[in-house]
Amino acid sequence: MEDEYLMLFHTKALALGLLAFGCCFSPSSFAAPDAQTSKLETSWYKAFFETQFPPISATLPPANGSVVLYKNKTDLVGLSYPAIFKPISRELRAALLAPTTTNPFTPLFPALHTPESLKKLNQCQMLSVKFELDDKNPTTEWVVAFSQKQCLSADASEALRSGDTEPHYWVIQKAPDNNYRVLAEGDGNIYITNQQKEQGYKEIRTLVLLKHAFPNNALQCGGAELTWRYRNKGYYLADTEVMAQDCQPLYFPELTGQAWTNAYDEYKRRATVLVDQWINTASSVR
């Protein structure tokens, strides 16, 4: 049973790119378009977005992000666009942080919306990439990422000594009337799939990491993959898959057999309680 759980996790981690749970991808492992390409293709089945924020040092590369586009369900390699994320524009940052920008996810991430946090967010490093989310040509969408660890940590030296592969993401849209709205938000990484489309909008998958959502809770592992589909004028939560694989190295690294299974089930149960509690704080996205 232990091996079955581990095999299930590693298979899903490889398919979904769950960096937050210990699976790492290197952009060089995928086929890549011409180096001069700076614009994503618009025809694809699935898109995987990931960013890395290394420790801030002159000897290390700067923060960067890549996108892998898969042309269909059978495409297991994908076409990689390394370093396609660019520093966010002044206009897009202002729109993202503006109180007039509609964001139904604000109750889920209250730590990002305090006056102190907003002041830091106005100064810290953010990356963005433009992509096509819907079938409506006049609209424009971006994925925006930043390191909560580096930007909002109470420890001023955190940005210098800590890297971050679990950044925070927004999916933000600009309408023809120049109004902006946040369509999705999460941590770790983000998937967008050209299936279950409603009103022309693709399906979005995000992560919630409990160590970010509940930093003061005794449980500092686990989370969930959240599936969002469009309805009426926004995305609603269509499915939730709770995960607790990253609890093993923290809480029961030496267990095997039935003891391992029992421990995993218990930590998944505890994670489920917190995930449900987290989701229930925002009725606007249910």
Image: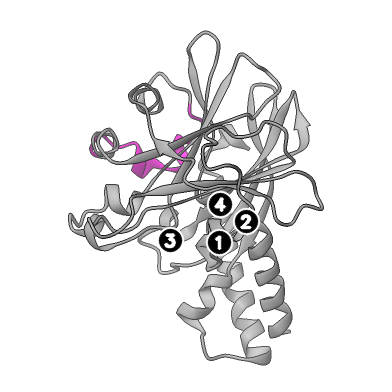
Determine the secondary structure under disc 2.
Answer: loop
Q: Residue at x 72, y 38 (%)?
A: 44
The label shown at residue 211 is: 3
- 58 or 12: nearer the eye? 58
Q: What is the image's colouring? A: one colour
Quickly name the residue at label 1: 25
CA separation in Å, label 3 and label 4: 12 Å
Labels 4, 2: front one: 2
Q: Residue furthest left?
A: 156
Mark closest to the chain's N terminus, 1 or 4: 1
Quickly name the residue at label 4: 207
Quickly name the residue at label 2: 30
Question: For the residue marked with disc 1, what is the amino acid?
Answer: Phe
219 horizontally vs 240: left or right: left
C-beta proximity under 8 Å, tags 1 and 2: yes
Question: For the residue marked with disc 3, what is the amino acid?
Answer: Lys
> What's drawn in magenta, residue-wise?
103-116
Determine the secondary structure under disc 1.
Answer: loop
